[in-house]
Structure formats: C-alpha cells, structure tokens
Image (tube, grey):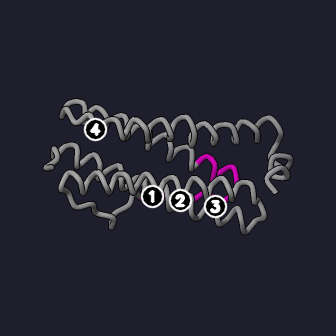
Amino acid sequence: MKGNPDVIAQLQHLLNGELAARDQYFIHSRRYLDWGYTKLYERLNHEMEEETGHADMLINRMLFLEATPDLSNPDKFTPGEDVPGMLKADLALEYSVAENLRKAIKVCEDALDYDTRRMLLIQLKDTEEDHAHWLEQQLRLIDMLGLPLYLQQQM
C-alpha cells in the first residue's frame, strides 16, 4: 500500500528520534550499571528496549507503506555526565519525542491515515504516561530527598 509522502516523512523523523533515544538510554543505563545504581540500570535498560520496540513499529509501518526506512541518521544527543544530568537529558528527549508525535499525528489526520495515527497515539501515551512521568518522578525525588539519599536508594 503506497503511503502518503508527508506521513512517511513524519515516520522517518520519528524513527530518527527513537534511534537517538535508544542510544541515549543505552549509554545511560550502562553508566548506571558501572556506578552500581542497579535500579536505575534496570529501568533505563527497559526503556532502551521499549525505544527499540517503538523504532521497530515505525520501521514496520514504513515498510507497509512501501517506504524504505533510513537508519543511518539518528538524531544527535548529548549524554548526561551525572545522575541528575542524565535524568534531565532523558526527560528533555521524551518531551521532544512527545512534541514530534503530536505533529505527526496531525499530519496523519490531515492525510486521513487513521491506522498510522492510532499507532502513534499508542506511542504518545507510552511516552507521556510512562517514560516522561517516571523521569519527572525521579527528578522530584531528588529535589525532595536530596541527591545522596536518592542515590542510596538506587543501589
């Protein structure tokens, strides 16, 4: 089924973001593991796997729409240097992904591509209600408990 070029362009843009998110979570999770923060490692490793799943859905949809996904140009990202910095970088990335998903959903609506729209709505819910919400909670906990106590709970 030949897809709408505007929808395909949005899917490619989203794919670039998911690949960057996957890579950012990958490096952050491994830093957490190296530092002994196993709870943060487990959560971020899980998030990395979910971002890989999101990329997989986008790739499959693009292939269904007879487009060729390009995995060679993920969005740029800058990993954090410490736990608060990594959490803030991840949250900024999730906010960016959510904004891009909303734009892509609008393009899908305009193109009357409701199947792609439905898929993106599921990703948006996961991004906002799971990923971003958890990151906001962690930053709030750091503010409430202080960094040393927060980090002690992550071992």
Q: Residue at x 39, y 57 (%)?
A: 56
Q: Which residue is mark 3?
A: 29
Disc 4 versus disc 2: nearer the observer: 4
Residue closest to the eye, 96 or 10: 10
Neighbour tally class for label 3: few under 14, some 14-19, many 20 plus, Cα within 10 Å: many
Disc 2 is placed on an element classified as helix
- Give the farthest residue toward the left: 2
- Relative image position of residue 33 (x, y in whole percent): 71, 65
Tell me which numbered mark, 3 or 1, is placed earlier along the sequence: 1
Left or right of 151, for residue 2: left
Disc 1 is placed on an element classified as helix
Q: Amino acid at mark 2?
A: Gln
Is residue 91 a member of the stretch shown in magenta?
no
> Could you say which quadrant of the image residue 46 lies in?
bottom right
Residues in magenta, as a range: 76-88
Disc 4 is placed on an element classified as helix
Measure the alpha-carbon separation of dots 4 and 3: 33 Å
Neighbour tally class for label 1: few under 14, some 14-19, many 20 plus, Cα within 10 Å: many
Q: Which residue is mark 1?
A: 20
Q: Which residue is mark 2?
A: 24
Q: Which residue is mark 4?
A: 115
Residue closest to the eye, 16 or 85: 16
